[in-house]
Amino acid sequence: MPLLVDATLSTLIPAIDAAARSQASAAYSGTYTKGNDTARISMDGANLRLNELKHGDKDILFALQEMWKYSLGALVPAEMANTTGIYRLFPGEIYRESVMDGGRKVVEEDWRFEWDFSEALGSKESELPGRGASAAECKGWKVVDWLYYGGQSVDRVVFVRDAVTGEVVGFEAPFLRSGVLGKK
């Protein structure tokens, strides 16, 4: 029986994972705007990525990278000073029902982004035992809520879904105080 279970799982899990990624990409990927503010989100092979976050003409992702570089100190490799990280988005499993201007009922989903700079840094060769043992360590989750601006965590973002259709209609970075950006 375990052979049959293993064979079934090895077939089903990749298919379910691929379907979930496809649905996430279709629902969340896109460009969100309001006035001069822009957020651009896409799916790579592993996760949703926050590719761009601009508040007017200010590159917020670059500014956050600079803030983290100086505030995290010894928690991250020194090489990150000259790298551009990837901002991976993860659902927080926190949902709130709300009403937007105009009376539209929505569900707000809290997400977090992690600054993943591992791809930019690459791997270092070593003859030491255990080389690569900590490669899968997720350092970003150790610094959730590390920095705040205006009383809001800078790594928290919110997707806004229509409560009736489930369609993602907006994106917000609460620390920017610019309100919900609409999906184009």
Image (tube, rainbow, N blue to C red):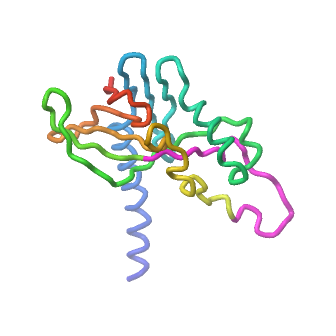
Is 82 placed left or right of 30 in the picture?
A: right
Is 64 placed left or right of 29 in the picture?
A: right
Closer-to-camera residue (75/126): 75
Q: Residue 133 at what x, y percent from top left? A: 70, 65
How many marks the image carries: the answer is 0
Q: Residue 105 at what x, y percent from top left? A: 16, 38
Q: Residue at x 34, y 37 (%)?
A: 26
* Residue 4 magenta-highlighted: no
Closer-to-camera residue (40/63): 63
The image quadrant of residue 128 is bottom right
Is 162 placed left or right of 21 in the picture?
A: left
Q: Residue furthest front?
A: 151
Closer-to-camera residue (155/149): 149
**Magenta part of the protein: which range?**
112-133
Q: Quadrant of the C terminus?
A: top left
128 over 91 or under it: above or below: below
Q: Residue 60 at what x, y percent from top left? A: 53, 29
125 over 164 or under it: above or below: below
The image quadrant of residue 28 is top left
Q: Residue furthest bottom?
A: 1
165 over 96 or under it: above or below: above
Q: Residue at x 39, y 39 (%)?
A: 25
Closer-to-camera residue (180/91): 180
Is 129 placed left or right of 149 in the picture?
A: right
Q: Quadrant of the N terminus?
A: bottom left
Q: Residue 178 at what x, y percent from top left? A: 38, 27
Q: Residue at x 18, y 41 (%)?
A: 163
* Residue 126 magenta-highlighted: yes
